[in-house]
Image (cartoon, helix red, strand yellow):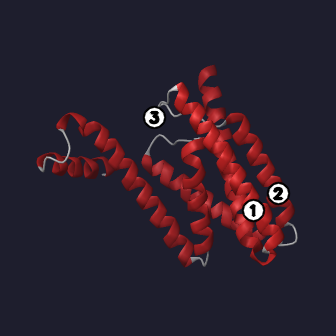
Amino acid sequence: MLHKLAGDISFHLITNKIIDIKDRDIYIYGLELLISTLFTSLSILILGFFVGELTSAIVYLSVYFFLKSYTGGYHAKHYYECYIYSILVFIVLIIIKNATLSVYQPFIGVLSLMFSMVIVFKLAPVENKNNPKTKEEIIKNKKIARRRILVLGIIIILGYIVKAELIDLWFMLAITELSIAYSILKQKFLEGRNHVE
C-alpha cells in the first residue's frame, strides 16, 4: 500500500513535469520513507496524547530525529516492522519512565547517558545497506553524532542541576538516548550474526 501510494504521487509529479521519469525510483523510495516517518511520528504523538505522555512523545521523536539520522542503528526490513518497533520502543520507554522512582531517575539517567555516549563514540555511525555512505560521509556523520550526543548530555546534566522539578523530562531524554544506543548495538549484533551465517 505504501509503495503504491508513493508510486501514485511520483506518477503525478512526473505528469506535471515536476520530476524526471528517470529519477522515479529515487523519488518513490524517498516518498515511502517520508510517508512512513510521518505516519509513525503522528501515531506516537497521538498515542502520547491519549496516555497523557505527549511531552514524552515529543521528547522521544525530537531525540530520534536529532540523533538517529547520524548514528544509524537498527533498520527493519519492512516499513510496518519499523512502525511496530518504533511504537513498542516508545511504550517501553514510557513504562520505564513511570516505573522508575523519581529519586532514582537522576542516577539511572546519568548511567544511561554515559552508556549511550560510549556506544555512540565507539560504534556510530552504523551503515545501512539501503543507504550506503562514502568514507567522507561516514566521518562527517561520526563527528556530528558525537557533537549531538554531547550537546544532549550537557542539556540533561544541566537540566538535572538547574531545573530538577522537570526530572521526568531529563529522564526521558536520557532513556531515549539509551534506546538509540540499543538500536546501534542491535544492528551491530545482527550484522555480526549475518557475517557468521
**Amino acid on which disc 1 is placed:** Ile
- Asked whether the residues under the numbered discs 2 and 1 touch, taking CB atoms below 8 Å apart as contact, a structural biologist would say yes
Residue 148 visible to an observer of this rendering:
yes
Residue holding disc 3 = 131
Query: The C terminus lies in which quarter of the figure?
Result: top right
Residue holding disc 1 = 156
Relative side of 97 to 29, left or right: right
Give the image quarter of residue 187.
Answer: top right
**Amino acid on which disc 2 is placed:** Val
Relative side of 185 to 134, left or right: right
Give the number of the mark in front: 2 or 1: 1
| Image vertical order of residue 142 relative to residue 161, above or below | above
| Image vertical order of residue 21 relative to residue 6, above or below | above
- Which residue does the image show at 63% across and 37% down from the upper left? 142
Dot placed on the residue nearer the N-terminal end, 3 or 1: 3
Dot placed on the residue nearer the N-terminal end, 2 or 1: 2
Residue 1 is situated, as x and y percent measured from the top left of the image, at 30, 52
Provide the secondary structure element on which disc 2 rests.
helix
Provide the secondary structure element on which disc 3 rests.
loop
Residue 90 is situated, as x and y percent measured from the top left of the image, at 61, 61
- Distance from disc 3 to disc 2, alpha carbons, whole Å, reads 33 Å
Dot placed on the residue nearer the N-terminal end, 3 or 2: 2
| Image vertical order of residue 190 relative to residue 7, above or below | above
Provide the secondary structure element on which disc 1 rests.
helix
- Which residue does the image show at 11% across and 48% down from the upper left? 15
Residue located farthest toward the top when viewing the structure as drawn: 196
- Asked whether 5 or 30 is in front, the reply is 30
**Amino acid on which disc 3 is placed:** Asn
